[in-house]
Amino acid sequence: GDSVTQMEGPVTLSEEAFLTINCTYTATGYPSLFWYVQYPGEGLQLLLKATKADDKGSNKGFEATYRKETTSFHLEKGSVQVSDSAVYFCALSSGNKLVFGAGTILRVKS
Amino acid sequence: DAGITQSPRHKVTETGTPVTLRCHQTENHRYMYWYRQDPGHGLRLIHYSYGVKDTDKGEVSDGYSVSRSKTEDFLLTLESATSSQTSVYFCAIRSTGTGNAGANVLTFGAGSRLTVL
């Protein structure tokens, strides 16, 4: 079945460092791809999405590009802030459902 | 705000007791979902609904049942709770934007933390 693999965390960075969180997927067809973020004690929020190959999703300084050839959707940010500390989930659409990766904890130190 | 609320937000119960979690939406969306979140597993789909009285199983449906008697409410029931069902449960609704704008975008509730002793 469809699946998503994310890099394991936690990822610990200093403020203003560059962030990459790797995400690869296995799917039949051409799914839409998503990054969701979960701040402590809250539900998940959509961060960005891409619906077809070569699309770039972006929001709040975060970016991810849908790479069909490498089946990847890596999340990047040029300069992280303490407020970016959260759990990040990569996901793909599978029919009427979303399939999530295991999540990556990001900790940003000041 | 998408208008989705979960209740209760926290519950502690004993093994073997029945538990019902409620998800309520004010948006009139057709699709509703129940996921559970566990460390190392991310979110896993338990059940989902695509309309009143229309439901289907997800990947971890054993030990759970659901009901949707009206559009706004989606109930998740643990008939006889076990310690392995200790988890955080999230309800979600699916947005229905035009074209690809809203396709398969889920909006989540704040979660219900269940502890089974």
Image (cartoon, coloured by chain):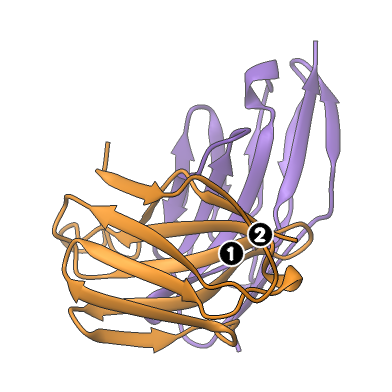
The structure residue drawn at horizontal position 46% and vertical position 74%, both measured from the top left corner, is B77
Picture disc at residue B87: 2
Query: Which sits in the foreground, B53 or A33?
Result: B53
Image coordinates for residue B48, horizontal then vertical, percent: 38, 76
- Chain purple in the figure, letter: A
Location of the N terminus of chain A by quadrant is: bottom right
Location of the C terminus of chain A by quadrant is: top right
Chain letter of the residue carrying label 2: B
Query: Which sits in the foreground, B78 or B40?
Result: B78
With respect to residue B93, does A35 lie above or below? above
- In the rendered structure, which amino acid carries the disc numbered 2? Ser
Picture disc at residue A89: none
The structure residue drawn at horizontal position 74% and vertical position 34%, both measured from the top left corner, is A19
The structure residue drawn at horizontal position 64% and vertical position 72%, both measured from the top left corner, is A25
Task: Using the rendered image of the protein, determine whether residue A70 is visible from the camera's viewpoint.
Answer: no
- Chain orange in the figure, letter: B
> Disc 1 designates what residue?
B36
Image coordinates for residue A3, horizontal then vertical, percent: 64, 77
Q: Horizontally, is B24 left or right of B63 in the view?
A: left
Instruction: Classify mark 1: residues with Cα within 10 Å, few (<14), some (14-19) or many (20+).
Output: many
